[in-house]
Image (cartoon, rainbow, N blue to C red):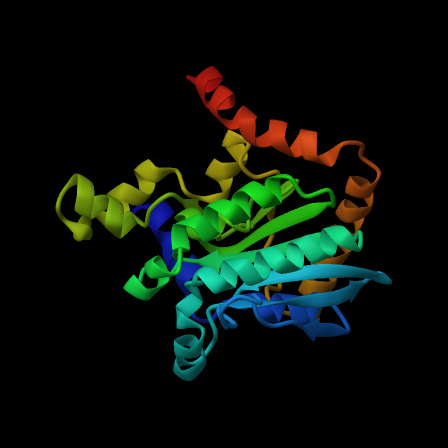
Amino acid sequence: MGRAYDIVRIARSGSRPTGADYIRGIFSPFIELHGDRRFADDPAIFAGIGILGGQAVTVIAIDKGHDTEERTRRHFGAPEPEGYRKALRLMKQAEKFHRPIVTFIDTSGAYCGVDAEERGQGEAIAESIMEMIDLDTPTIAILIGEGGSGGALALGAADRVWMMENAVYSVISPEGCASILWKDAAKAADAADGLRLTADDALSFGIAEEVISEDGLGGKAFYARLGEKIERELRELAEQKDLRQARYERFRSFGRKYTERR
């Protein structure tokens, strides 16, 4: 089994902290907010307002849940349209009140049911990406497990993108890629190597700014260390001029960087 696929398996492990765990471990107090004000509340998106270093921060996580009951309720971290619309509502609220935004991403992809498509899944993801790029407030996105396709990118169009050392970020799952290329999902390990989906790969391509050590993952010291890092980065971002233009140029540069590498 290839090294990349080993990391995929770790990223998917049910023993890893969920997005809600990160939020509760770093931000205190924290108040959860619900609903997209259009249709319903999506439990796959765990979000609200937390305090970090005396500052109010809007925090949004895609949460897979822990046990079978919770995972089922959160549909295994696959958000529906109202989840992305809830996230966008809170991001726009944060911009209005000059609060920074931190997102925690862990999803194999957006929910792909017929009902989600009928309610505008693609449009909800596209709108989230478009609006997040244009937010006039500091944003940090942290991939804590799986970062699957547009379902992850909808919350990843940030000023800074960080990845845990055993997180992955990819346009498609290794199994899905193998099924398309070789008509054989058993070749997922080969596909994972070719997809360049690890945190180190993302760092080398400039897609992520930093890879975060998982030393002590889930412990108090781990959350304290990450919280301090987030606090420092948000202060630095707050001092920058024209965040929107810098963010736009960041994402526009991806294709150029790849071309230069070739």
Q: Give percent across and percent down for residue 120.
A: 40, 55
In the image, residue 3 above or below residue 204: below
In the image, residue 119 above or below residue 203: below
Q: Give percent across and percent down for residue 117.
A: 34, 58
In the image, residue 191 above or below residue 30: above
The answer to which of 159 and 248 lies nearer the viewer is 248
Q: Residue at x 73, y 42 (%)?
A: 136
Quadrant into which the C terminus falls: top left
In the image, residue 11 above or below residue 139: below
Q: Give percent across and percent down for residue 32.
A: 66, 73
State left or right for residue 178 relative to residue 134: left
The total of numbered circles placed on residues is 0
Q: Residue at x 80, y 32 (%)?
A: 241
Residue 210: tell me if it is visible: no
Question: Looking at the rendering, which quadrant does residue 115 occupy?
Answer: bottom left
Residue that extends furthest to the left in the rendered view of this protein: 183
